[in-house]
Image: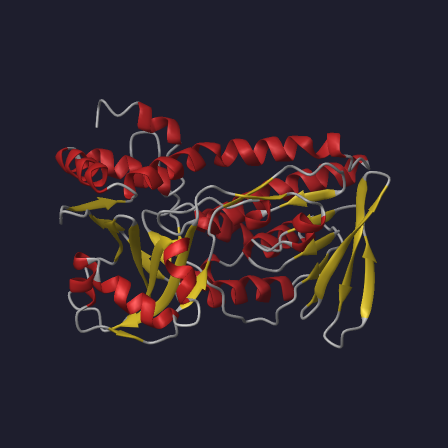
Amino acid sequence: MIVVGAGPAGAATAILLAEHGVSVLVLDRARFPRPKICGEYLSPEAPRVLDRLGVLKAVDAVAVPLAGMRITAPDGTVLTGAYRALGPWRPYREHALGLPRATLDALLVDRLRALPVDLREEVRVTDVLVEDGRVVGVRALDRAHRALEARAPLVVAADGRASIVAQRLGLRRPHRLQRMALVTYVAGLAGAPEPHLGEIFVDPPDYAIVNPVAPDRANLSLVVPLADAAPWSARLGTFFAARARQLPHLARRLAGARMVAPVRALGPLAYEVASPGVGGVLLVGDAGGFFDPFTGEGVFTALRSAELAAEAALRALRTGDGSREALAPYEQARRAAFAGKARLARALQLVVAHRRLANLAARTLGRRPGRLDVLLGVIGDYVPPRALLRLRGW
């Protein structure tokens, strides 16, 4: 097996396969630990997979537990929801986690290194080998820019939003939602909520997310229309500071705080990826597409899709059939697992794009706080999205 990418999706896939005795080659262009633009939030269900991977204890030692979310609407309405058991639905943990992606990724890579896995860092995959309607390997350049070629019965594309595998197979598609995330770290936040909460500030057409990731350090992500931010690509810090001041409730929250890292940008955030038209390849995590998140919970998607991919890979290796038809159930399972969440994300994007609608939604949820907890449960990956259609009892 070849796994392209050693982030959460690739590392998780490789760990699960190696634990079943599969010979795995992992290629990543970076050297770990390395920085990564991310909301740095792990949903309450992510620890279940981290536990299965053997890294949860190490994660718990450095992560900040987040008991829930505090959401501030444009008119100043404040909602606070908790991650908790709701009827038949119970989270693996009754809290989310905040921690730097560099830390999470390093812990997963350390786990990889403890297994019989051939991990090669600073190796950049440049192309995909396709023969007779199947992906049979990859071409790459090592750190000395020497060309190498690797072949395997299956290739797992876990190389993120800029997936070279998806690009070479012609699968990536633009998305109509054109937004950019501007991300930095802040320290000195006054009046931090106790227990720790993630915070969301909605002020159309923007929204901001504040996730504590360490003592006196929080990830601050500001999501804005791409067209507004793009002209400022050479002066992101200036644009960020000016834009944040125009979100009055966020500006008050940041009073006295200071940025402790440069502003970095990622966009357009959302994009679509078609199903492979060839066999021999599985798309995992962001390589398979990305919808604009409301809380930065993409890590769980990476981990869960890695579980599904590992199951599909083991079936293919056991039967010797890695054809497109044999791997189609994985694509169906992956889309089914995240389709409801993607529909919710689209609905939330509609809400946060319109001031009146955002205020109305906040006031409605404020009258029935149990409904906010159900919504957080869906966002937190332990309540099925269909539960939102049955809110009469909450």
Report the front residue among 216 and 83.
Answer: 216
Report the front residue among 68 and 241.
Answer: 241
Q: Position of residue 217 (x, y in %)?
A: 31, 70
Q: Left or right? Give the position of 135 relative to 159.
A: right
Instruction: Please tell me in which quadrant of the rendered image residue 314 appears.
Output: top right
Q: Which colour assignment does the render follow?
A: secondary structure
Q: Residue at x 39, y 37 (%)?
A: 346
Q: Left or right? Give the position of 378 relative to 201.
A: right
Q: Residue at x 72, y 44 (%)?
A: 281
Q: Residue at x 28, y 35 (%)?
A: 374
Reply above or below: 168 against 365.
Answer: below
Seen as rendered, the residue at the extreme right is 132
Instruction: Please tell me in which quadrant of the rendered image residue 238 appears.
Output: bottom left
Q: Is residue 262 visible?
A: yes
Seen as rendered, the residue at the extreme front is 231
Q: Position of residue 375 (x, y in %)?
A: 30, 37
Quadrant in which the C terminus appears? top left
Q: Position of residue 18 (x, y in %)?
A: 69, 53
Count the marks. Answer: 0
